[in-house]
Image (tube, coloured by chain):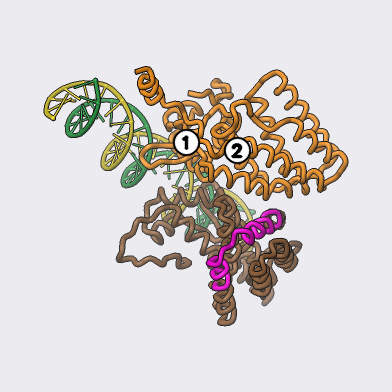
Chain colours: A brown, B orange, C green, D yellow
Amino acid sequence: MVDLGRENPVEAEEIDESDIVERIFEAVVEQRLPPGTKLSESALCEAFGVGRMRIRRSLLLLASREVVELHANRGAFVASPTPDQAREVFEARLALEPNITRLAVQRAGEDDLAELNRLLEMEYVAHKERHRHDAIRLSGQFHTMLAQIAGNAILIRTVKELVTRTSLIIGLFGAPGLNSCRDDDHASIVHAFHTGDAEKAAWMMTLHLKHIESHLQLDAKPHEAVDLVQLFTQKSLVEQ
Amino acid sequence: MVDLGRENPVEAEEIDESDIVERIFEAVVEQRLPPGTKLSESALCEAFGVGRMRIRRSLLLLASREVVELHANRGAFVASPTPDQAREVFEARLALEPNITRLAVQRAGEDDLAELNRLLEMEYVAHKERHRHDAIRLSGQFHTMLAQIAGNAILIRTVKELVTRTSLIIGLFGAPGLNSCRDDDHASIVHAFHTGDAEKAAWMMTLHLKHIESHLQLDAKPHEAVDLVQLFTQKSLVEQ
DNA sequence: CTTGACAGGATTGTTAACAATGCATTGAAT
DNA sequence: ATTCAATGCATTGTTAACAATCCTGTCAAG
């Protein structure tokens, strides 16, 4: 089971189901929960130390954001977006995020600019030191932060959902080397922030998103979760 | 209790919780469920003829779309958007719907154009004959249909949420006469569809949304559910 | 007459037992 | 040896009873 825990088991905190949803979102973003992963209720109960009800509610919320799929009588699985769904996600992102970027540039204060710089720096470091999970998470966090700077709860929520689903899409259809956004794109967007050029920032965001999408192989079959049984049976057939 | 029923009580159909969510969405859009209305579990169980579990799941989903508010140990209520939330809804709609309109124009086929005309006609009739609920519902349906023509499930879902919340906002902050969108705006958008002018359609949508927002009184206090006690005590004070 | 506290009832929140479904293993037959 | 069927187990889905909280109506005191 993937380690979802970060809390100190000694301190028995209150665990809201929002926390659970948030944590699973994070794990999916960081690609520590690949598409198709079974999310069994008992395992999650143990992992978060809560009752079954909280878990089921959390899974329902995650399903309503299409980050997990619920199959009747079979349980919850991390979503495996189809190529069509992938296209929809990028279409929605292209429709939203350039405008969010515009808003963010108009509303960014000094502290926001500093925060963007800090995030960019952390991205750079994580990338350089090959902390893959951190790099992916920070890369997604960049997009979320723009919505936060724009200061709109709806947009924040929507971007979080789309960024998370994008992680799943990259995991399934991304070229093996490509993990996340290139830092360069983010840097040029931040540069536009500092010059206060909203239009340029929005356009850079558009290019950035198209850039990511262009590196997907939506025609090819997705990278399925390796089915060990099938793997070995096929191997034996070859060896024969 | 507001009549949510439409099903034949004789025919015992399968009622999915998606249906329940959909029906409550519809009732809110039509302003048959005003902001602040208590949605008690027992009443909903009876209304839909399902167990408590289904109802609670439905309410959770509705809350995740911010159409109902869940207060711990007090139950579920139809949401009462604050002025800030109202601004957020319109900001999101302005960020999304012009782009959706563009996509829809590009992808609309003959049948889509016919369907738009039909909807426009129904809107006109409902408005003329003062079928207030129908008029509001059809007016919202227009916006949803554009997302459907664009053919993107994410956008459809988001627009539905935003349209529903807009109904709540208009109920709270709208000028007493203003019920919904003006047909004229929709007609001019459809006209742009027929000429295939995506840019114009998008811009018409922008104007349309700004037009609606400009007719709100977000500064004033919302039209609260009339508190009878307070009303009469104040009256008596004046009379003294 | 108003204000406060208390008790009763009603509603929501949680838990645990039960039912139902799917999955895996075993065994037998071709 | 492979395929199919049946049985047992594990997991999910549902129900019902229980616990906790809040609202209301009553009563007494100021």
Mark 2 or mark 1: which is in front? 2
Q: Chain of mark 2?
A: B
Q: Report how far apart the C-alphas of labels 2 and 1 lie in the structure.
A: 24 Å
The local crowd at label 2, few if under 14, some if 14 to 19, many if 20 or more residues have their Cα within 10 Å, is many
* Magenta stretch prevailing secondary structure: helix
Please name the residue that numbered disc 1 is placed on: B55
Residue under the point 63% across and 59% down: A106
Query: Is A64 in front, or is A101?
Result: A101
Q: Position of residue A3 (x, y in %)?
A: 45, 67
- Magenta stretch encompasses residue A97: yes
Q: Chain of mark 1?
A: B
Q: Assign a secondary structure to mark 1.
A: helix
Q: Is residue B140 visible?
A: yes
Query: Is B133 in front, or is D1?
Result: B133
- Residues in magenta, as a range: A94-118
Disc assigned to residue B166: 2
Residue under the point 67% across and 19% down: B130
Looking at the rendered structure, the kind of residue marked 2 is Thr
Q: Assign a secondary structure to mark 2.
A: helix
